[in-house]
Image (cartoon, coloured by chain):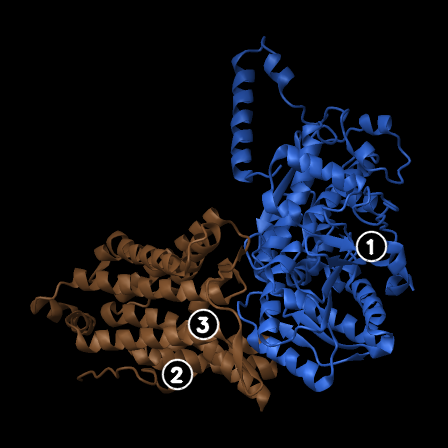
Chain colours: A blue, B brown
Amino acid sequence: MTKKLPLRRALIALASISLVAAACGSDDDDSTTTDAPADTEAPAATDAPAATDAPASTDGDESDMAELEVPDNPDNGVTSDEILVGWLGDATGPTASTQTAHRDGAAAYFEKVNQEGGVLGRELTLVEFDDAYVAEDTLIGFRKLVDDDKILNFIGLNNSSGIDAVAPQLEEVGTPVIGSQSGSTTTHENDYFWNTIASYADMVGVVQGRLAEELGGADKIVAIPVALTVASGDQWIEAVNSTITDRGGTVTEAVRYDARADDLSAEAITIAGLVEDKGANAIVIHGTTKPFIVLFTALDAAGVTETIIGGMTGLVQPAVYQEAPEAVTDTAWGTHTFTPIDIDTPGNVEMREFVESEGKWGDTSKSIGFVQGWVNGKIQVEAMIRAAETGELSRASLQTALGTITNFDTGGQSPLIDFSRPGHNGGANVRPYDWDGTELVAVGDYAEWTEFLPSGD
Amino acid sequence: MSELFRYLIAGIAVGSIYGLVALGFVLVFKATSVLNFAQGEFLMLAAYLAVTAAVTNSFGLAVSLLFVVLALSIVGVVMHFGVTKKLIGEPPFTLILVTIGVAIVIRGGLLMFYGPLERSSVDLLPAGGFTIGDVPVTWIDVIMFTVAVVCSAAFFAFFRWTTMGLKMRATAENLEAAKVVGIRPGQVFLMAWVIAAFVAGIAGFFYANRVAVVSLSLSAIGLRAFPAAMLGGITSVEGALIGGIIVGVVEQVGAGYLGGEWRDVFAFSIMLLVLLIRPSGLFGDKELVRV
């Protein structure tokens, strides 16, 4: 459930005034106060679905969870009838297609939970702020969601430059971030990020492994690191340089490109020059859907059509293969922690059925970001229930509860999520995905690629 | 050397589009002394309409182009009667702020109607191309350049040799004097806005065929074209195209050799230099003030 907070606040204020007026009007009529939501005692979460949806390594059984109650904590987003969770990302900027899918996946899971009775007797409400991929606006959105809306935590905080800007403030406000879409170094170094997507180092590790297979050996790789002109782009290039060279390959100079640009001819010509002059045979790329399409179109015009392109999560998006020139995408593939929606797993089937029954979310539900948002929702619910076992739901108790999540089964929508790994690298396992002309196809199981993960070395 | 030639070709192609957008700036300014900061949004609107015509409704090249330029011409009419007519005679700064407001409205409208996700681009123009030496050149870039040259030539002739062109120049020069000699400013302003929107329609239609996807980021081209208009001279029709090509080439060569993050630095450094060294631009009219 998403909403416009001011309207809700106005309604709540109106309702409060009505209640006071009713109470003052008649001492004998106690029906109003009886029906009013309790301020401190929330109804038991008898229908809380998280216990069954999330077969985590919890010690509590379903009946225990059903009896859990927590007092209101409005300064931490827990009111008598709802729990406020923040989403801060790009809803209208150049990476909107990927990020809105992430938001909608979480919103869809919240919707499902709410229809089944909510959690801890309350509805889940996603409060969003669109930073349009502008780091300054990420800062504004962060303070607005934390200070004004008083959210419990973030479910996603996605722009890497914005993440760098707000990361130092996370400790100050003590609010955890579940499942950022960024695999940047910052998200794996800050204790308040609980990562459901692999780190860049792990992604590049698997990209290197597959390139070595395709080119006939690690020493045959001559890779061009290509990255967006954002903070995480530097980290991607660093990961490519160290991983490829440490394993015996060669790396050329890096090429940077702008996510907002609608023409990337110069960058494509530079890449063409590196292919011709330096003998580069692979492009190891960082980015997201729209910039990929723009760059691949320019690469086609520049005649770069036979170089292998291995990349990060953004390359596991059908739109890239549907919109960019086939001559370029024929040799492209991406890596991802999550399982695309079309691949049948128990979790994906359940998600698809719910999405189809609701008829909402349109194109965004086709994106793999939607799967991540949905899984983040599952983890959010599981963590809140674990936090409630301490007798309160607060930012601090949620932060502690997240640390207890290990081997969390997402129904095949991802590998087991394990936050006990260093850097809260919950979704460390990644695998490549190919485009077969109509859909994305997983290349092997996660286990087949574990040997290439630096975090698993 | 081959790489430099490639950057030059790419710069001319991109510069042609900048030139067309800059032409829109010039056409409005020449007649009304107003800088239309909604010109990039006009182009973006045209590109989205091209998608509606060609992709959603599968119209052919001619019908789609006609649909887009007619729709944009109507936008020009609405712009005049709905927004700027009542402001004739007001300080240019007021009108400039109004154009910024119009830009925000267009962007918001597109966001509500089409949503934030990018749309498939249009593919009504011939694909492929040819090579000069070992440098590939696409037909779309050739077409864009040709359209930009033809438009510039047509409007150069329009301003120089037609009665309406003369009226527009006279109105921009001195509104009160123009009224005295019988020129109707309302008619001139209407024509200016219609022509500017019409040019944006042409640019947006062809640009929708060139870009990989149509998205809300297309409006940024308005900011890029502004230095082009300043470089060519904000009152010079022919200067708009030449300024656009110079900005495009410098930008591509700079981004190619130094990296994509330098693209904007080059574009706006040009504008800064022009304002400091030659405020009237390469081909603009120097304003003489009797003291």
Kind of residue sitting beneath label 3: Arg
Residue under the image location 33 percent in, 81 percent down? B239
Residue wearing tag 1: A424
Q: Chain of mark 2?
A: B
In this picture, is A238 found above or below A437?
below
Q: Residue furthest left?
A: B181
In this picture, is B192 found above or below A272?
above
C-alpha span from label 3 to label 2:
15 Å
Kind of residue sitting beneath label 2: Val
Q: Chain of mark 3?
A: B
Q: Can I make out residue A74 in this image?
A: no
Residue wearing tag 2: B274
C-beta proximity under 8 Å, tags 3 and 1: no
Residue under the image location 69 percent in, 51 percent down? A369
Q: Which tag is nearer the camera, tag 3 or tag 2?
A: 3
Residue wearing tag 3: B224
Kind of residue sitting beneath label 1: His
Q: Quarter of the image holding residue A120?
A: top right
Marks 1 and 2 on same chain: no
Looking at the image, residue B177 sits to the left or right of residue A270; the answer is left
Q: Nearer the viewer, residue B26 or B145?
A: B145
Marks 3 and 1 on same chain: no
Looking at the image, residue A258 sits to the left or right of residue A55; the answer is left
Q: Secondary structure at mark 1?
A: helix
In this picture, is B63 found above or below A58?
below
- The crowding category of the residue bearing disc 1, from other C-alpha atoms within 10 Å (few below 14, some 14 to 19, many at least 20), is many
Q: Secondary structure at mark 2?
A: helix
- The crowding category of the residue bearing disc 3, from other C-alpha atoms within 10 Å (few below 14, some 14 to 19, many at least 20), is many
> Where residue B160 sits: x, y (%)?
20, 78
> Where residue A199 sits: x, y (%)?
79, 61
Q: Quarter of the image holding residue A423?
A: bottom right
- Quadrant where the image shows the C terminus of chain A: bottom right
